[in-house]
Amino acid sequence: MIEIDFKITGKDKNLILGILNQKSSKPSKKIIIWVHGLTGDINEYHIKHSTYEFVKKGFDVIRFGLYDSPAKCRKLENCTLQNHADDINSIIKQKCKEYKKVFIIGHSYGGPSVMVAQPKADAVCLWDPSFDMKNVSWNTKNREIKKLTKDFYTRHWGYTFIIGKKMIDEGRKYTAEKCLELSKKALFPILVLTAEKGSYAKLPSYSDAGNNNNKRILIKDADHCFTKEFCLNKAIKETLKWFNKF
């Protein structure tokens, strides 16, 4: 397996860093773009492990950071959902020209990032995607979200992150109905893999509107990050099965 570090310039002149994984020096004809979630990164276990499995099955895979430490990269506290969407489309435009098939995976907040991007893709798979962000991710009654300054909030998940007010205000516009509007606009089929023990198992999702091929699968016993090995393997299997249809 080959790993190639790359960097491109995004829409806002921002630096985007990523890794391209290939089975050999000869590129595949099909590629998967992995979009991580909010506060996540390209080296999370479920992303890295699945990348290697996808490459074994003949896909090239791109993992890229929606923010990073170098000065010219975006910083999490200044990001918005639209920034994430713009960077997804920059990756497709600059790194996927030679591929016949382009597939995208979005995990957690990477899900709405993909949906807002409305990318040119053959199919999309969303791993336990954030949905109805107004009432779930950014619920005003959520005690884990605290105002830090007029422009920034803190978000507590066992440890604390700084999130910009712009990100939260933007996210609160996305009710369930507005999320489904994104599905109706989409020109690609969507598979949603819902974690049984996550926050979205009892909610509708992006597969509920739009393309007639859309599908939803409940991954039993899975948590939001698919940390149990058999749950992760099931997610990988279903993702491969889905992409191989198109």
Image: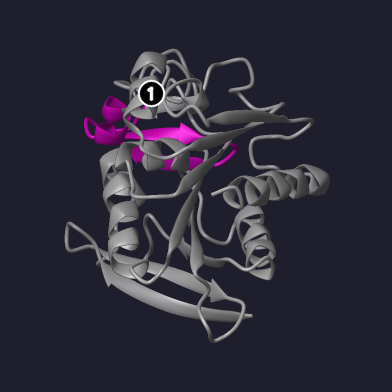
* Horizontal and vertical percent position of residue 23: 62, 77
Residue 148 in the magenta stretch? The answer is yes
* Horizontal and vertical percent position of residue 136: 48, 20
Is residue 145 found left or right of 173 in the rendered image? right
**Residue 80 falls in which quadrant of the image?**
top left
User: Which residue is labeled 1 in the image?
Assistant: 179
Residue 75 in the magenta stretch? The answer is no
Q: Nearer the viewer, residue 37 or 96?
A: 96
Q: What residue is rendered at 26% in x and 50% in y? A: 86
Crowding near pointer 1: few (<14 within 10 Å), some, many (20+)? Answer: many
Q: Is residue 3 above or below residue 141?
A: below
Is residue 146 found left or right of 199 in the rendered image? left
Magenta span of residues: 147-170
Q: Is residue 80 above or below residue 134?
A: below
Is residue 149 found left or right of 136 in the rendered image? left
Q: What residue is rendered at 50% in x and 20% in y? A: 208
**Residue 167 falls in which quadrant of the image?**
top left
Q: Nearer the viewer, residue 135 or 158?
A: 135
Q: What residue is rendered at 71% in x and 26% in y? A: 196
Is residue 223 found left or right of 112 in the rendered image? right
Q: Is residue 230 above or below residue 71?
A: above
* Residue found at the far left of this picture: 12
* Horizontal and vertical percent position of residue 191: 56, 36
What is the secondary structure assignment of the residue under circle 1?
helix
Q: Is residue 35 visible?
A: no
* Residue found at the far bottom of this picture: 25
Q: Is residue 98 above or below residue 228?
A: below
Q: Is residue 67 visible?
A: yes
* Horizontal and vertical percent position of residue 112: 41, 35
Q: What residue is rendered at 76% in x and 49% in y? A: 233
Q: Which three-letter amino acid code belongs to the residue tagged 1?
A: Cys
